[in-house]
Image (spheres, grey):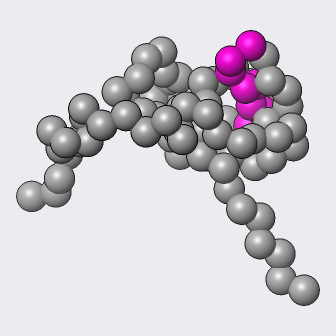
Amino acid sequence: MPKKGKTARDKRKKNLAKHFPIINEGDSVALVRDLSSKPCFPKRFHGLTGKVLIKQGKAYVVEFFDQDKKKTLAINPVHLKKIQNKLKN
């Protein structure tokens, strides 16, 4: 059977590096739901990638495509994972 959810150890462990990431405007990020911290974005956006437009308070405004439509959301940094763009020369 596949493992579902977090283990008991992961639930009580707080990772401060997730709460204070170094994200700049124009960086590519992945939307990853962390259910241990609320509020969260809708489930259907989990796994999508987008670009950070600006920082708004504690959250970041992220622009991404949902099907063919361009959408923007203000998301807490806990739910963002920075993507390294590796270009081959």
Residue 9 appears left or right of 52? left
Residue at the (71%, 62%) spot, across then down: 84
Magenta stretch, main secondary structure, is strand
- The spot of residue 73 in percent (x, y) is 69, 22
Q: If the image is split into quadrants, where does the C terminus sit?
A: bottom right
Which one is nearer the viewer's eye here, 4 or 10? 10
Q: Is residue 32 left or right of residue 49?
A: left
The x, y position of residue 21, in whole percent, is 64, 40
Looking at the rendering, which quadrant does residue 10 occupy? top left
Pinpoint residue 31: horizontal percent, then vertical percent: 58, 39
- Report which quarter residue 4 is drawn in: top left
Q: Vertical placement of 9 versus 79: above or below?
A: below
Residue 48: tell me if it is visible: no
Q: Is residue 36 left or right of residue 75?
A: left
Question: Which residue lies most toward the front here?
Answer: 16
Q: Which of 88/43 is in front?
A: 88
Q: Residue, x 37% and y 28% (percent of image)? A: 35
Question: Which residue is most to the bottom?
Answer: 89
Q: Is residue 84 above or below residue 31?
A: below
Residue 47 makes an appearance in the image: yes
Q: Residue at 41% across / 23% down in the picture?
A: 37
The question of residue 48 being in magenta is answered with no
